[in-house]
């Protein structure tokens, strides 16, 4: 081992956190950890800024995962109702972290990550489809899994498991009509 | 003569504007699963492809909020039904990480074996069906025949051929016995023959090569920007494999290489999958040889696995533990926290974002489905190619609609 190499740090995220602190300053995000996951909670207004710094300055070139969660009725919850998570990966160093942004009723909306990663396109559409979170600046925000005329957001916690009768009330076409 | 007619300028502009729209699917033999494409064509050239999905949406993620961590394995199975054990391993990998369980060595080895069997089974179907769609029918039959032997392994180990539901929190449904191992040995023995058959039928097959070479090229930059993973990304030069780069189970102890290619076309994806099968074969051979003795479940004192009948009936601890796990409103303790954990599935990174609220069911089960992410790239890949290339590109992506729509 060369003496030029850095001491193997106990925290694989140390370098990233140092860069973030240098570029963004204090108070943009809060940190929490669980197992091997490092999470950065960021207010929606600073989300795009944080994501682009992570992409351009810290080498997180891949958006591995994007999804939403509805925390309505989550025990001991004090933060916003919805949260969207962005799992980012640095392919060169195998470092992975999670950025979380919370949004609240009514009209939950977040800036879109499509300008940064085209891969966010369908994943944001899915979050919009199932949770009703709008992504501002998304090029084509339509429903993706549910039919266009579907009125509810099925993965919200106030939507019942068995639906609200959409399936039973679905217009049925006979062979002649179709 | 027709050329003279086309020389008239107004007719020529008319001919240029004559794009037409073709509906492809949702029921089409070459989609293999239920998905729909709306293709805008200029003659036979695809100008724009608009995928329309959701035909198989079954609310799997909603179901995850109502089933316990052990029950949900049956749903996880049904996502990518071409390689069910891989889905089980991925699901319980996330759950065990959440609960902080360290698996026994034997269990880790067995999970590696079933994962790699699933990978072979998945790649056999994908490569075989890709050839089938492009006119090389015979290779598909040889590939499918070997999949039968892999199903025999599933049947012997769990009792189910198609959806084994084999993993449990902290262990497995049953231990491997000698009959399972002998079935695995017969898969291992048959594989080289099948591989060489496929090699002879496809690798120098002019018709097949002409249909896949240079078709559906995905650049390395696009692969990264579009979140591609697994063989799709590796065929484009992204040499990332979760088994190597974010190791889990006992993969660091096993000797294998990660094949990749720089071309990024359908041929590269096909070849990466073929080579991955050989590597999986290597992994299984090593894992079967090194398979340690010992328990498959974590000790019952850890309060996760269900004790077996002998322990339940003959020991006080076993009886209490059985009661605790079986009775409603009891069971093991879960943290009130969340995490993301992923494994390398045959199609790419199969991850779960798991939110637990301290109860026996997850608060949120978000699957990161590789099919969904790869299908989003499809319009990019097919643009400018011929209509006939749609099936070539679809075949190379291995889209599984149950996983795509969940």
Image: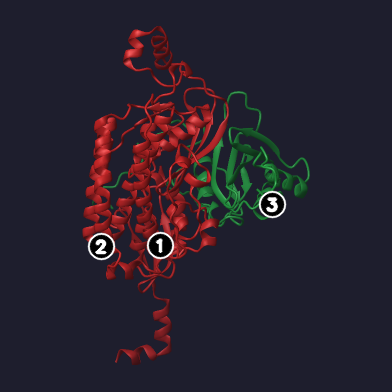
Q: Rounded to the nearest whole Å, what is the CA distance between mark 3 and mark 2?
A: 50 Å
Circle 2 sits in a helix, a strand or a loop, which is it? helix
| Front in this rendered view, residue B18 or B75 | B75
Q: Earlier in the sequence, mark 2 or mark 1?
A: 2
- Indicate the quadrant containing the N terminus of chain B: top left, top right, bottom left or bottom right: bottom left
Can residue B48 be seen?
A: yes
Residue A157 location (% of width, % of height): 51, 31
Residue at 58% over, 41% down = A85
Residue B257: x percent and y percent?
44, 51
Residue underneath mark 3 = A53
Of residues B19 and A69, the one nearer the viewer is: A69
Q: Colour of chain A?
A: green
Which residue is located at x 42 percent, y 33 percent?
B108
Mark 3 → mark 1, Cα distance in angstroms: 34 Å
Q: Secondary structure at mark 3?
A: helix
Q: CA distance from mark 2 to mark 1?
A: 17 Å
Q: Which disc is residue B199 wearing?
A: none
User: 10 Å neighbourhood of mark 3: few (<14), some, or many (≥20)?
Assistant: some
Q: Regarding mark 1 in the picture, which secondary structure is present there?
A: helix
- Is A78 on the left or on the right of A161, as rendered? right
In front of the other: B231 or A87: B231
Q: Return the residue at label 1.
A: B268
Which quadrant, please, contains the C terminus of chain B?
A: top left
- Identify the chain of the residue marked 2, using the numbered disc in the image: B
- Of badges 3 and 1, the one in the foreground is 1
Q: Chain of mark 3?
A: A
Question: What is the drawing colour of chain B?
Answer: red
Contact check, label 3 and label 2, Cβ < 8 Å: no
User: Could you tell me which chain the residue with mark 1 belongs to?
Assistant: B
The residue to which callout 2 is attached is B200
């Amino acid at each position: 081992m060369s003496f030029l190499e850095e001491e193997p740090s106990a925290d694989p995220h140390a370098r990233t956190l140092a860069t973030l602190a240098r570029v963004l300053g204090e108070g943009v995000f809060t940190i929490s950890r669980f197992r091997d996951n490092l999470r950065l909670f960021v207010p929606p207004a600073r989300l795009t800024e944080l994501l682009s710094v992570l992409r351009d300055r810290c080498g997180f070139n891949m958006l591995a995962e994007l999804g939403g969660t509805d925390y309505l009725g989550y025990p001991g919850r004090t933060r916003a109702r919805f949260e969207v998570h962005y799992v980012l990966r640095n392919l060169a160093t195998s470092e992975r972290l999670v950025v979380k942004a919370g949004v609240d009723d009514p009209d939950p909306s977040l800036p879109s990550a499509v300008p940064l990663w085209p891969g966010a396109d369908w994943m944001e559409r899915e979050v919009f489809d199932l949770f009703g979170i709008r992504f501002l600046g998304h090029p084509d925000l339509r429903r993706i899994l549910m039919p266009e005329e579907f009125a509810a957001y099925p993965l919200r916690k106030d939507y019942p498991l068995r639906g609200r009768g959409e399936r039973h009330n679905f217009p049925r076409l006979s062979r002649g009509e179709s | 003569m027709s050329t003279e007619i086309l020389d008239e300028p107004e007719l020529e502009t008319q001919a240029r504007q004559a794009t037409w729209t073709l509906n492809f699917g949702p029921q089409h033999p070459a989609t293999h699963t239920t998905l729909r494409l709306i293709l805008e064509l200029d003659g036979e050239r695809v100008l724009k492809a608009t995928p329309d999905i959701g035909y198989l949406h079954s609310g799997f993620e909603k179901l995850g909020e109502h089933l316990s961590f052990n029950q949900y394995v049956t749903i996880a199975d049904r996502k990518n039904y071409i390689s069910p054990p891989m889905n089980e391993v991925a699901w319980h990998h996330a759950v065990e990480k959440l609960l902080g369980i360290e698996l026994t060595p034997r269990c880790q080895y067995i999970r590696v074996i079933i994962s790699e069997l699933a990978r072979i089974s998945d790649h056999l179907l994908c490569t075989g069906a890709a050839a089938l769609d492009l006119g090389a029918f015979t290779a598909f039959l040889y590939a499918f025949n070997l999949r039968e032997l892999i199903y025999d392994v599933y049947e012997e180990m769990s009792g189910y051929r198609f959806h084994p539901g084999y993993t449990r929190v902290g262990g497995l449904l049953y231990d491997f016995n000698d009959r399972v191992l002998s079935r695995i040995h017969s898969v291992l023995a048959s594989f080289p023959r099948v591989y060489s058959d496929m090699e002879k039928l496809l690798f120098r097959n002019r018709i097949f090569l002409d249909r896949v070479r240079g078709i559906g090229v995905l650049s390395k930059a696009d692969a990264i920007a579009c979140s591609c993973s697994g063989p799709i990304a590796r065929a484009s030069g992204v040499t990332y494999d979760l088994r190597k780069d974010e190791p889990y189970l006992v993969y660091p102890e096993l000797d294998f290489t990660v094949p990749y290619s720089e071309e990024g076309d359908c041929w590269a994806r096909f070849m990466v999958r073929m080579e991955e099968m050989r590597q999986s074969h290597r992994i299984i051979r090593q894992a079967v040889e090194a398979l340690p003795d010992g328990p498959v479940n974590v000790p019952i004192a850890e309060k996760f696995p269900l004790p077996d009948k002998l322990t339940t009936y003959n020991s006080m601890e076993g009886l209490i533990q059985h009661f605790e796990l079986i009775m409603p409103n009891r069971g093991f303790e879960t943290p009130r926290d969340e995490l993301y954990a992923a494994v390398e599935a045959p199609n790419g990174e199969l991850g779960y974002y798991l939110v637990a609220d301290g109860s026996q069911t997850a608060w949120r089960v978000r699957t990161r489905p590789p099919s969904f992410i790869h299908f989003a790239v499809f319009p990019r890949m097919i643009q400018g190619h011929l209509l006939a290339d749609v099936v070539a590109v679809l075949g190379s992506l291995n889209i599984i609609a149950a996983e795509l729509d969940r």
